[in-house]
């Protein structure tokens, strides 16, 4: 038997079908919007207090001479058995009624004031009006008078009209008054509210000449949104206005509105007198037009 060696051809590889590539994976991307970077700075604001006042906290100016809750020093509250803070000491003298009172310079009881006139310039966009005349420069007589034209310091009252005051004048209590040193007596004012509804108030806390315990305490109010109107509020008047002239006048020849001249019991505590210099009338709170 003969065996033949026959070469065997190498195996032919079978074609393998190509596998499909898997789909790309889907990845969810969350986009977050970040807020812009904020630069934070600490700003310290310096508050400037009027003369005679000190800073309490960050933004409040107080007068240690008249503030019941800061009498003589910050945080010193007067006991309930006292009515006021007078010259930095708890007292039963009349209390200044205005909460943010600013004293007319030199008229704060630091020295005596008698028969004097001071001027006050209001902000440039604010004026007071009587008889159709407006002025941002106001004159104050220590004898209970506010003038829109230069005042006189005359202490002897008279009937209206009078030659003592030449222009539009508010005579809340024209009498021989005096501010005594070593007290909280004076003439104070604030300007309150925002334009065009501001109120300018003058508070007189005085005594009679040569009678320091006879108090004459009242306010004079002007309203920006009510030109030609002036209001007097009386708190304590020792002789009830029996030696004073009360009213308004435009000039030495009038017109004028005279409420009283040396009239007994002319005023009483918490009485309000309102004068309309446009209609030449006045009225008493809870009363009728005269």
Image (spheres, rainbow, N blue to C red):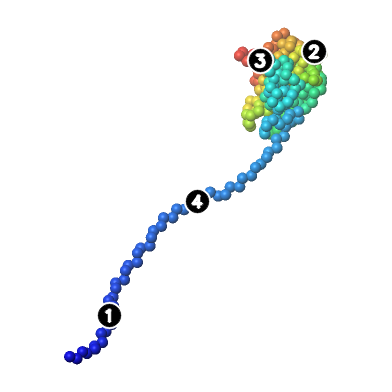
Distance of mark 1 from mark 2, alpha carbons? 139 Å
Give the labeled residue for mark 3. 270
Kindly report which numbered mark, 3 or 1, lies closer to the viewer in this rendering.
Answer: 1
Q: Residue at x 41, y 55 (%)?
A: 28
SS for callout 3 = loop
Q: Compared to 18, does 44 lie above or below?
A: above
Gap between marks 4 and 3 measured at Cα: 65 Å
Give yes or no for contact between labels 4 and 2 (Cβ–Cβ under 8 Å): no
Q: Nearer the viewer, mark 4 or mark 2?
A: 4
* Number of residues whose C-alpha sits closer than 10 Å to that of mark 3, classed few (under 14), some (14–19) or many (20 or more): few
Tell me where residue 110 appears, x and y as whole percent.
Answer: 80, 23
Q: Say whether disc 4 or disc 3 marks the residue closer to the N-terminus.
A: 4
The answer to whether residue 257 is visible is no
Q: CA distance from mark 2 to mark 3?
A: 22 Å
Comparing labels 2 and 3, the label whose residue is closer to the camera: 2
Q: Could you say which quadrant of the image residue 4 lies in? A: bottom left
Tell me which numbered mark, 2 or 3, is placed earlier along the sequence.
Answer: 2
Q: Which part of the image, by quadrant, shows the C terminus?
A: top right
* Residue plotted at (73% across, 30% down): 54
Measured as percent of width and height from the top left, residue 248 is found at 71, 19
- Residue at the (48%, 51%) spot, across then down: 32
Q: CA distance from mark 1 to mark 4?
A: 62 Å
Q: Residue furthest bottom?
A: 2
Sequence-wise, which precedes: disc 1 or disc 2? 1
Q: Which residue is mark 2?
A: 211
What is the number of the mark on residue 33?
4
Please tell me whether mark 4 sits on a helix, a strand or a loop.
loop
The mark closer to the camera, 1 or 2, is 1
Residue annotated with mark 1: 12
Which label's residue is closer to the chain start, 3 or 1?
1
């Amino acid at each position: 038997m003969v065996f033949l060696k026959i070469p065997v051809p190498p195996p032919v590889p079978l074609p393998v079908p190509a596998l499909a590539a898997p789909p790309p994976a889907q990845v969810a991307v969350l986009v977050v919007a970040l807020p812009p970077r904020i630069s934070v700075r600490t700003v310290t604001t310096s508050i400037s207090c009027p003369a005679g006042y000190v800073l309490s906290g960050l933004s409040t100016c107080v007068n240690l001479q008249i503030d019941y809750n800061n009498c003589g020093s910050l945080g010193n509250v007067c006991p309930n058995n006292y009515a006021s803070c007078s010259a930095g000491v708890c007292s039963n003298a009349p209390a200044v009624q205005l909460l943010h009172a600013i004293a007319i310079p030199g008229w704060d009881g630091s020295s005596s004031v008698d028969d004097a006139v001071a001027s006050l310039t209001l902000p440039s966009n604010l004026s007071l009006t009587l008889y159709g005349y407006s002025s941002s420069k106001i004159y104050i007589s220590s004898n209970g008078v506010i003038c829109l034209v230069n005042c006189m310091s005359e202490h002897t009252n008279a009937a209206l009209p009078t030659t003592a005051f030449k222009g539009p004048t508010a005579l809340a209590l024209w009498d021989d008054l005096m501010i005594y040193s070593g007290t909280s007596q004076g003439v104070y004012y604030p300007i309150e509210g925002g334009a065009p509804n501001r109120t300018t108030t003058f508070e007189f806390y005085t005594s009679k000449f040569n009678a320091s315990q006879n108090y004459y305490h009242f306010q004079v109010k002007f309203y920006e949104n009510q030109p030609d109107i002036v209001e007097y509020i009386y708190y304590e008047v020792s002789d009830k206005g029996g030696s004073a002239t009360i009213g308004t006048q435009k000039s030495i020849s009038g017109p004028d509105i005279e409420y009283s001249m040396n009239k007994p019991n002319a005023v009483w505590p918490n009485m309000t007198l309102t004068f309309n210099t446009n209609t030449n009338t006045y009225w008493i709170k809870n009363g009728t037009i005269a």
